[in-house]
Image (cartoon, helix red, strand yellow):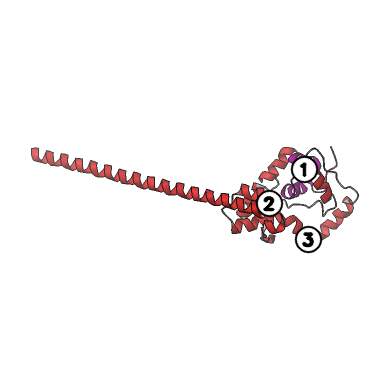
């Protein structure tokens, strides 16, 4: 088994939310099972665990992540030299570390949820490179770091292009219109059923009254 980074599960949370690395690559780097990493992405595992940035901790470099992101067969290599030094400093300075880089994707998710709620969780996740589970948590306001998020346009941050964003919004708008028409159709059908039901009820009542009249006449 390879040497694991400091706070492996929290590191895995960060890698899932902020990179395009495969579950296998993340699992191998953090000494976790691949299914456990998938569970993190789906929101079933590591609930409440705060993401731990391995770049700020000196355990990975952005270049290292980029290289492995482009090649799924390439494992991540742990930076060992600065690991012990960074760990002691991280405990003292963690809350003062700038988080702007780490927060880009969640911030963009919050912006889209607020301004374009018609976008599905899957669409938002695809646009910013996040996960459906993370989008759902932010939409439901149960994301662990929600109070520290700042809504930001993903196009301005460079997470997606204006064309990609406009296509996604257009698709979402069309879906909303289809659902609206479907609901209206269902409502009309329900109203029609109620009308037919009422007519049948009146017919039965009328027949009963006629039968009663015939009985009275015979008596």
Q: Position of residue 104 (x, y in %)?
A: 72, 56
Q: Residue 112: in sight, yes or no?
A: yes
* Residue 16, percent from left and from top: 73, 47
Picture quadrant of residue 208:
top left
Disc 1 versus disc 2: distance between alpha carbons? 19 Å
**126 or 216: nearer the viewer:** 126
Residue extending farthest front: 163
209 or 107: nearer the viewer? 107
Region in magenta = 1-30
Q: CA distance from mark 2 to mark 3?
A: 20 Å
Circles 3, 1 touching at the beta carbon (< 8 Å): no
Which residue is at a point 50% across and 50% down the rendered structure image?
177
Residue at 69 percent of width and 61 percent of height = 148
Q: Describe the element under mark 1 as helix, strand or loop.
A: helix
Counting residues from the start of the chain, the first of labels 2 and 3 encountered is: 3
User: What residue did someone put label 2 on?
Assistant: 128
Q: Is 20 covered by the magenta stretch?
A: yes
Residue 159, x across and y down, in percent: 70, 53
Q: Which residue is mark 1?
A: 26
Quarter of the image with the C terminus in it: top left
Measure the alpha-carbon separation of dots 3 and 1: 24 Å
Q: Main secondary structure of the magenta part?
A: helix
Q: Secondary structure at mark 3?
A: loop
Q: Badge 2: few (under 14), some or many (20 or more) residues near its Cα, within 10 Å?
A: many
Marks 1/2 in contact by CB < 8 Å: the verdict is no
Mark carried by residue 98: 3
The reply to whether residue 145 is in sight is no
> Earlier along the polypeptide chain: callout 1 or callout 2?
1
Is 31 situated left or right of 182 in this image?
Answer: right
Horizontal and vertical percent position of residue 135: 64, 51
């Amino acid at each position: 088994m390879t040497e694991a980074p400091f706070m492996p599960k929290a590191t895995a949370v960060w890698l899932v939310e902020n990179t395009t690395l495969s579950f296998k690559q993340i699992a191998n780097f953090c000494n976790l099972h691949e299914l456990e990493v998938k569970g993190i992405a789906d929101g079933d595992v590591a609930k409440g665990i705060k993401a731990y940035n391995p770049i700020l901790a000196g355990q990975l470099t952005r270049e290292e992540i980029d290289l492995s992101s482009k090649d799924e067969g390439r494992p991540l290599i742990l930076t060992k030299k600065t690991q012990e030094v960074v760990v002691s400093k991280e405990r003292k300075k963690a809350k003062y570390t700038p988080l702007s880089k780490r927060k880009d994707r969640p911030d963009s998710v919050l912006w889209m949820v607020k301004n374009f709620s018609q976008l599905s969780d899957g669409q938002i996740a695809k646009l910013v490179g996040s996960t459906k589970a993370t989008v759902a948590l932010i939409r439901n306001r149960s994301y662990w770091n929600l109070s520290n998020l700042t809504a930001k346009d993903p196009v301005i941050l460079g997470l997606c292009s204006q064309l990609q964003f406009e296509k996604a919004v257009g698709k979402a708008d069309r879906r909303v219109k289809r659902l609206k028409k479907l609901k209206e159709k269902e409502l009309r059908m329900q109203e029609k059923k109620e009308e037919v039901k009422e007519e049948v009820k009146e017919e039965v009542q009328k027949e009963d009254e006629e039968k009663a009249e015939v009985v009275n006449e015979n008596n």
